[in-house]
Image (cartoon, helix red, strand yellow):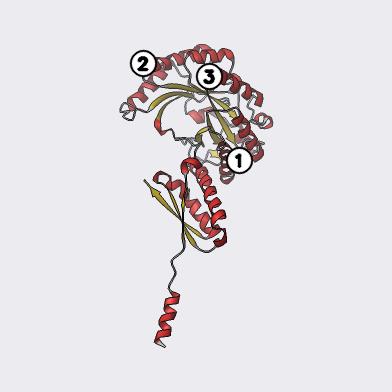
């Protein structure tokens, strides 16, 4: 009798869960996503200067936080302040001056030259390494490029936003797809690095149009890319459209999904994705109720986690499909710095794998 009881107890002991090991090559999975930690940027915002447009999503004051004109002295001050901050540049990071905010080449040419002269002074003194600016596709011409080349501009970023003419019209961009193609080709002809910015969730856009846009953009072979989900800023035209129910912002889930689809296209190329999602500032925050849309402090991390999850699911369907739902442990080995991306923000990947496959994800960071 005693012997039978002992056997029963032994049978009831929980068996250790089966464990499977997966080593992921995160450098390959996230190969296009470039971390600019090896570089300092001196951002100089030129608000709305020279721009005669009223893109529906734009509220330049909200983006830059400045609404006055920028003088050469302002530029000297901004650069000096940053250089002072970078003084202990022990790692010898490259330093870049970046004119952001408005449409640089829409400013009067004399003013552009004044700004570039300041930047060139620092370049000639060896205090900075490169100059970058952003502008609109229809503000690029041979005449303008000759000036930018003369003043050693290394990179021009074009605000493309979409390559679909209906979306461009609905967004009141004031330019069409052909302007983008022409400007991109001219910039390349002048041997200046080409950057492009696109948006997901613009009026009349669909996932098919986002994919069309990225594929058209990649054909132009940009060196770098920024991808932004549309936020609805108060006092923008889009806000009125939103209030009148003429525009519905993308849900957070849909915007992550669209950017993820875009990144899958990017993986076929060597384009460097240098930003995903707007940088949160004092005004652009989750807490700001004047902004509507898929705003999130770590938007990029959600997208990267989805790219990683895709690889984990490929492994599951190839190697574990016969034991799905069996309650197992999956050990994923990756470099330490990627642990949070694999687990996912708010543990999204961990929760998803448990719910869908009954798999317990254990992430093993390695140095
Ligand atoms: S072109 Fe740029 S600055 Fe001008 S309205 Fe559009 S987004 Fe704003």
Residue displayed at 40% across by 29% down = 39
Ligand 1 rendered quadrant:
top right
The residue that mark 1 highlights is 249
**Helix, strand or loop for disc 2:** loop
The residue that mark 2 highlights is 125
Q: Label 1, label 2: how many angstroms apart (C-alpha)? A: 47 Å
Q: Note whether 212 is above or below 256 in the view shown.
A: above
Is residue 226 found left or right of 130 in the rendered image? right
Indicate which label's residue lies in the foreground, 3 or 2: 3
**Which mark, residue 187?**
none
Indicate which label's residue lies in the foreground, 3 or 1: 3
x then y, percent, for residue 104: 52, 20
The quadrant the N terminus occupies is bottom left
Residue placed most toward the observer, 317 or 225: 317
Q: Label 3, label 1: how many angstroms apart (C-alpha)? A: 38 Å
Residue displayed at 40% across by 85% down = 3
Callout 1: 10 Å neighbours few (<14), some, many (20+)? many
Callout 3: 10 Å neighbours few (<14), some, many (20+)? few
**Which mark, residue 191?**
3
Residue placed most toward the observer, 125 or 67: 125
Numbered marks: total: 3
Callout 2: 10 Å neighbours few (<14), some, many (20+)? few
The residue lying furthest to the front in this view is 319
Looking at marks 1 and 2 on the same chain, the residue that comes earlier in the sequence is marked by 2
């Amino acid at each position: 009798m005693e012997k039978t009881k002992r056997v029963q107890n032994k049978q009831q002991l929980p068996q250790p869960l089966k464990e499977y090991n997966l080593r992921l090559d995160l450098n390959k999975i996230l190969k296009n996503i470039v971390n600019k930690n090896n570089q300092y940027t001196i951002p100089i915002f030129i608000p709305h200067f020279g721009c005669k447009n009223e893109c529906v999503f734009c509220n330049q004051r909200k983006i830059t936080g400045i609404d006055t004109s920028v003088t050469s002295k302002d530029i000297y001050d901004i650069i000096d302040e940053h250089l002072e901050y970078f003084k202990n540049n022990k790692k010898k990071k490259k330093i870049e001056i970046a004119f952001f905010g408005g449409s640089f080449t829409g400013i009067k040419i004399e003013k552009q030259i004044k700004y570039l002269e300041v930047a060139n002074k620092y370049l000639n003194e060896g205090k900075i390494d490169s100059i970058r600016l952003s502008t609109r596709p229809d503000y690029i011409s041979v005449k303008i490029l000759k000036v930018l080349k003369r003043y050693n501009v290394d990179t021009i970023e074009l605000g493309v936003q979409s390559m679909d003419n209906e979306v461009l019209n609905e967004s009141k961009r004031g330019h069409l797809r052909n302007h983008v193609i022409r400007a991109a080709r001219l910039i390349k002809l002048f041997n200046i690095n080409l950057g492009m910015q696109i948006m997901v969730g613009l009026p009349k856009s669909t996932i098919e149009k986002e994919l069309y846009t990225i594929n058209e953009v990649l054909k132009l072979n940009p060196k770098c890319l920024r991808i932004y989900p549309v936020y609805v800023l108060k006092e923008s035209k889009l806000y009125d459209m939103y209030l009148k129910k003429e525009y519905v912002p993308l849900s957070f889930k849909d915007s992550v999904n669209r950017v993820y689809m875009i990144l899958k296209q990017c993986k076929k190329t060597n384009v460097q994705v240098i930003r995903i999602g707007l940088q949160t500032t004092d005004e652009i925050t989750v807490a700001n109720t004047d902004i509507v849309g898929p705003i999130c402090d770590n938007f990029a991390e959600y997208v990267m986690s989805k790219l990683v999850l895709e690889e984990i699911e490929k492994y599951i369907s190839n190697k574990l499909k016969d034991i799905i739902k069996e309650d197992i442990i999956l050990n994923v080995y990756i470099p330490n710095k990627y642990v949070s991306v694999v687990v996912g923000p708010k543990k999204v990947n961990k929760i998803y794998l448990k719910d869908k496959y009954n798999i317990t994800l254990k992430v093993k960071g390695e140095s």
